[in-house]
Structures are given as C-alpha cells and as structure tokens.
Image: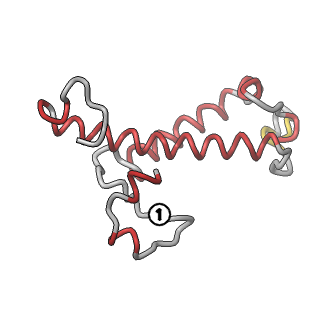
Amino acid sequence: AGFFDPFNYCETQPESFARRRAVERKHGRIAMMAMTGCLIHNADIEFPGYLSKSANLKFSDIPNGLYGITKVPSAGLLQIILFVGLIEVAWWPASNYSGDYGCGFFGAKYDDEEKNPKAKRRNG
C-alpha cells in the first residue's frame, strides 16, 4: 500500500484511517506553528508592552523555553485554551479530511495544489 499498516486499518476501518490521517496532518501543522513560536521567542523577538498590566508583567519578562508557560497568568492560559478550542471547532474542523482549511500558504493559493493532490500529504 506504500505505507506501514501493521493492523490493517485500511482494510478493516477505512473511515477511521482517513480521519486519523487528517488529524495527523492538522496536528503536524499545529506543531510546526508552535515550534515557530518557540524559535521566535528564543530569538528574543517579543511584543512590546505588557502581557498583564494588572500583574505588571511585560512580554519581555517571560523566560524562554517551557518554563515560560508557568509565568503566564491563569487568565492568559484560559484565553489560549479558548482560542485553540475555537480554531479546533470553527476554523480547522476535524471533519475536514481534505487538509485544505482555506488559508493557503501565508494566505496565497497556488494552482499546483489541484494538479498534484499528494503534495499536501508529502509536504504537511
């Protein structure tokens, strides 16, 4: 079949295999965005101003790495979780198996995507 399938999901559960492939593609894109955010923050490229005006916490006060998430106020973490949930439900729904979420590459769409349907699977 061209890929590793030790439990024969393609033959026994073709619908769930298609969903797993779509979810893996989406989570790969999310992981790439998260890693880009880590690299940008570690390069000390930060927003000017305050993360929390009431706590007198600036964006530049947040340390690099995973330790930085512990310094974000709980209201900020709640906002992050709600925003990710909104994206999961509204913008990038798990029921969209095509991998085309309407955003293109930095907002631009290319004609080659229609000509080569396997390009999305190979390139994320």
Q: Specify how the rendered protein is coloured.
A: secondary structure
Q: Who is closer to the viewer here, 87 or 94?
A: 94
Q: Who is closer to the viewer here, 83 or 105?
A: 105
Q: Quadrant of residue 38?
A: top right
Residue 120 percent coordinates (x, y)? 40, 56
Residue 3 percent coordinates (x, y)? 30, 38
Residue depicted at 83% across the width and 49% down the height = 45
Would you call the spot at circle 1 few (<14 residues within 10 Å), some (14-19), or many (20 or more)? Answer: few
Label 1 amino acid? Cys
Residue depicted at 41% across the width and 44% down the height = 25
Q: Which residue lies furthest to the left in this view?
A: 12
Q: Mark 1 points at which residue?
A: 103
Residue 31 percent coordinates (x, y)? 55, 40
Asked whether, in this view, residue 20 is left or right of residue 28, the answer is left
Q: Quadrant of the N terminus?
A: top left
Residue 17 percent coordinates (x, y)? 24, 36
